[in-house]
Image (tube, helix red, strand yellow):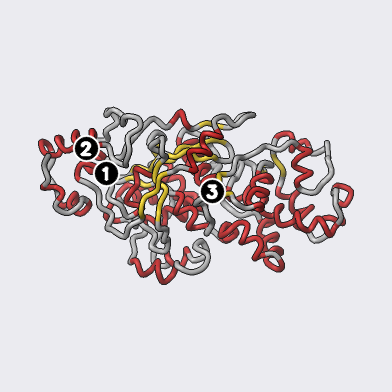
Amino acid sequence: MVVKVNPILKTWWKDIQKNQELEANELLGGLTALISVESDRHLIKALLKFWDTERLVFRFRDFELTPTIEEVGGFMGLAYKELELIVPHKPSPRSFLKQMGMCHNPNLLCLKEGWISLEFLYSHFGDEEGHQNFHREFACSSAKSERYRLNAFAVALLGSLVFPREGGTIHTGLCYVVRMLDRGGKTLVPMILAEILRALTACTKGKRYFEGCNFLLQLWAVEHFYQRANKVDIVRGTMGNKIINHPLRMKHFISPVGTEDWFTYLKERSAVEIQWKYYWLKPRRAIIRGNELYFIELIGLNGVQPYAPLRVLRQFGQIQMIPLRSHMSHYGYDFESELPQVNTILRRWKNVITIDVQEHRPFCTPEYYVWLLEDAEHRDLSEGGLPGFGDEKERRWARNLLNTDYDITLEMKKQIVPNIGEQHD
């Protein structure tokens, strides 16, 4: 994972701030603030131990959590509603250089492998004398090359911090992603979330390098596991860049130190001891499921990733019930030379189902509580094509178990909807 921000990127950002900071923030939102984030690799390593690769959520003592589109978009200040997904494209070496205003260069063998170095991008586009030093490699004048500088910085930042690769190389496909952002009408948020989820699954299964944005995942987790008064978020987080404001909101949080301390801390948390909602985040509606599937397919930079917000309704201020579930694993895959089923995914994205974001306490139904503790892996998945959010068949199964084998404990009462425990079928 990214442990330290490359000093070259920091230097480049300082130069960008002199003349193009506004344009950079319009293009990238709050992502430029990631340059100032200090990595906590121990937290990420601890979180991996709780990631469920089948259910696609973090499973803790008596609750589940997952990063949501709304939360990721909120941190970055980037829009996602009613915008199209970006479909990645791996450019040929000639195409990549053309998009960067440069001449074809057969000596750049790295382009055939789909990567470019940060050092190359900075020396040609970040350095004020870049065009003068490498003018034979450019297909445009010095004046015209200025318009490529900001996009080159965006490619560098995304490739270094948001979609990192082992060895620090930068995915050449990000040039196309930045072009799509610059044109407008498309969103980067689902792609970022997709690669975080993909990285969680890959690393849980043994992959060594975390190829998602571990900085955003780190911020997301700390804000959920530090329970605080709502006014803290409202006073310290409503205005300005949410990543920059993060230390202010976490001012009094005593962070565990080391992987084992973090693991123990996370293992001991219960559902009544965490911050379910960010009160600095004020979306009216949340994307909750597809109109055909019980989950949502996200197009990442390197593959397609299922996403299951139905399992974390409490993050939207809703009552958590037993969610509709289906097999998701075969909907996720890596991109090869072609992008199968993308048109279907784009159509489904336009028809996602949303839900109101409420201010309610984070309650769940007693049936859900029992269902979660029973770890109902043996249970049948939901029938296909059902409307709504909850599985009625599973609710009846859990209700019967609750009535015969469970007492409503004090810990359960803190979580379940008041008085619902007395209801009987």
Task: Classify the position of the N terminus by image quarter.
Answer: top right
Provide the residue designation for mark 3. 213
Amino acid type at image mark 2: Arg
Q: Secondary structure at mark 1?
A: loop
Which-is-in-front pick, marks 1 and 3?
1
Provide the residue designation for mark 2. 395
Which-is-in-front pick, marks 3 and 2?
2
Q: Which mark is first along the chain, 3 or 1?
A: 3
Q: Residue at the right extreme?
A: 136
Provide the residue designation for mark 1. 321
Towards the viewer: 307 or 268 = 307
The residue positioned 69% from the left and 64% from the top of the image is: 20
- The quadrant where residue 301 appears: top right
Distance between the alpha carbons at the discs numbered 1 and 3: 30 Å
Image coords of residue 218 (percent x, y)? 47, 52
Please indicate whether residue 211 sits to the left or right of residue 204 in the image.
right
